Every structure is written in C-alpha cells, then in structure tokens.
Amino acid sequence: MKIQYIANDGKIFDNEIDCREYESKKQVDEFINKRELIFLSRSGEVLFGDIDDCAERAAYIFVNSEAALRALWGENECQREIRPPATGYWYYDYEYETWKSMKIQYEILEDELSELNRIYDRFDYLIRKPQN
C-alpha cells in the first residue's frame, strides 16, 4: 500500500511534509503576487523567494491581511515572537532586535521634528532680535 498526498493544484507527493511545504510556498507566492506581503532589504530592494529567507533578510515588511500574517508566522508558533505581530508597515530595529511599527515611529519622529523646529525658530528669533 502506498499513500500519496495531493496538493490543491493536483501535484502529488509521497509524504505529507513535502506536500504541506509546497502548499505553504504556493500560498505565500500568492500573497506576494497580490502584494499582501512585501519584503524590502535595508537598501529598499524587493526580496523574493522562500518566506523564511525573505523574512530573515528583510529590514522592512508590509503585511496587508490577517491571512498573510498567518502565512508569515507559519506553522511554527515561535515565529510570532520574531516576526511582525500584526498587519501594517514594519521595520526591524537592529538595536533592540525587534520589529517596530513604521506608523508609530513616524508619529514619534514627526513630534520630535515639530519640537526641534519650534526650538530652531526660537533660536532664529533670538539671533535676529535687535539688541538693546
């Protein structure tokens, strides 16, 4: 007796693990093609290939759906700790070795920039102010 495993597209495998890995890769490829998962390197180049390899090399990840997020996490539960925790735009903070939300970081930097502009304007005023 021989057991065969058939993927959704009809491809036949001799073992379940190979079949599951094939299905997972096909699903990830679909997310990438639909632009629900986008991986970028530090220089902003789009990364392609195996999801684990892309996630490992990526400095930026865009996750557009819960299904794409689950595919990114994979079947390994510990991936949730080393991958972005939710949908959205993410960057890898190498100092703290964690994924951070680009939206939150942008808001923080925007606030800091506003404060620096306010201080700069104050200095500029004091420098140009006529002395008594």
Image (cartoon, rainbow, N blue to C red):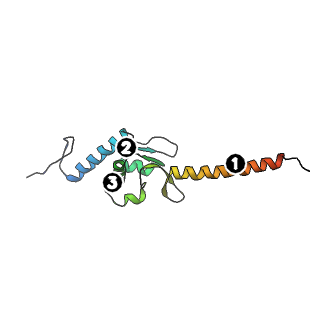
Which residue lies at the image location 30% right of the left edge and 46% below the top edge?
25
Mark 1 and mark 2 lie on one chain; the one further toward the N terminus is: 2
Q: Residue furthest right?
A: 132
| Viewer-closest of 100 and 26 | 100
* Place of residue 65 in the rendered image (x, y in percent of width and height, measured from the top left): 37, 47
Amino acid type assigned to the residue bearing label 2 in the image: Gly
Q: Is residue 113 left or right of residue 124?
A: left
| Viewer-closest of 130 and 44 | 130
Please name the residue that numbered disc 1 is placed on. 117
Q: Label 2 vs label 3: CA separation? A: 15 Å
Q: Label 1 vs label 3: CA separation? A: 44 Å
Q: Which mark is nearer the camera, 1 or 2?
A: 1
Q: Label 1 vs label 2: CA separation? A: 43 Å
Estimate how packed mark 3 is, as few (under 14), some (14 to 19) or many (20 or more) residues with alpha carbons within 10 Å.
some
Please name the residue that numbered disc 3 is placed on. 74
In terms of secondary structure, where does tag 3 sit?
A: loop
Q: Residue furthest front?
A: 132
Q: Is residue 20 left or right of residue 90?
A: left
